[in-house]
Amino acid sequence: MTWPAVHLSQSIDAAPDVVARFAGDPANLPRWAAGLSNGIRQEAGRWLTDSPMGTVEVRFVGPVEHGILDHDVVFPDGSTTHNPLRVLRNDTGSEVEVTVDT
């Protein structure tokens, strides 16, 4: 089965390695994913955030250093959502593209 998907993108005036390094650091998640994370903490090697759905775990599955910021969100019931996210070169800057199910 396939789900309808939407691709969202944002141009950023910074080099892809800079953007990937910033966005791929889980500590920065509240700065660019405010709808998911209003604060994040590391507990027992896991990155946890209090979201509108309850406490969720966020796992980057990278490789982040190559601009692949795919991340899994593990919900309180144990279900997992995979979120594809890429940082692409756009001339001297970057294009960040995420795919979301609708």
Image (cartoon, grey):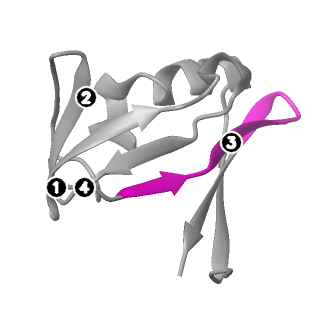
The N terminus appears in which quarter of the rendering?
bottom right
Q: Which mark is residue 57?
A: none
Q: Secondary structure at mark 4?
A: loop
Q: Earlier in the sequence, mark 3 or mark 4?
A: 4
The residue that disc 2 covers is 47
Kindly report the distance in space between the C-alpha atoms of the residues bearing marks 3 and 4: 22 Å
The residue that disc 1 covers is 76
Disc 2 versus disc 4: nearer the observer: 4
Q: How many marks?
A: 4
The residue that disc 4 covers is 75
Q: Which mark is residue 86?
A: 3
Mark 4 and mark 1 residues within 8 Å of each other at the beta carbon: yes
Q: Secondary structure at mark 1?
A: loop
- Residue 76: x and y in percent read 16, 55
- Residue 26: x and y in percent read 35, 27
Question: Residue, x 24% and y 16% (percent of image)?
Answer: 45
**In front: 72, or 29?**
72
Kindly report the distance in space between the C-alpha atoms of the residues bearing marks 2 and 1: 13 Å
Kindly report the distance in space between the C-alpha atoms of the residues bearing marks 2 and 4: 12 Å
Residue 67 horizontal side relative to residue 21, left or right: right
**In front: 47, or 18?**
47
Which amino acid is tagged 3?
A: Arg
Magenta span: helix, strand or loop, mainly? strand
Mark 2 and mark 3 residues within 8 Å of each other at the beta carbon: no
Crowd class of label 1 (few under 14; some 14 to 19; many from 20; radius 10 Å): few
Which amino acid is tagged 2?
A: Trp
Kindly report the distance in space between the C-alpha atoms of the residues bearing marks 4 and 1: 4 Å
Disc 2 versus disc 3: nearer the observer: 2
- Residue 41: x and y in percent read 15, 26
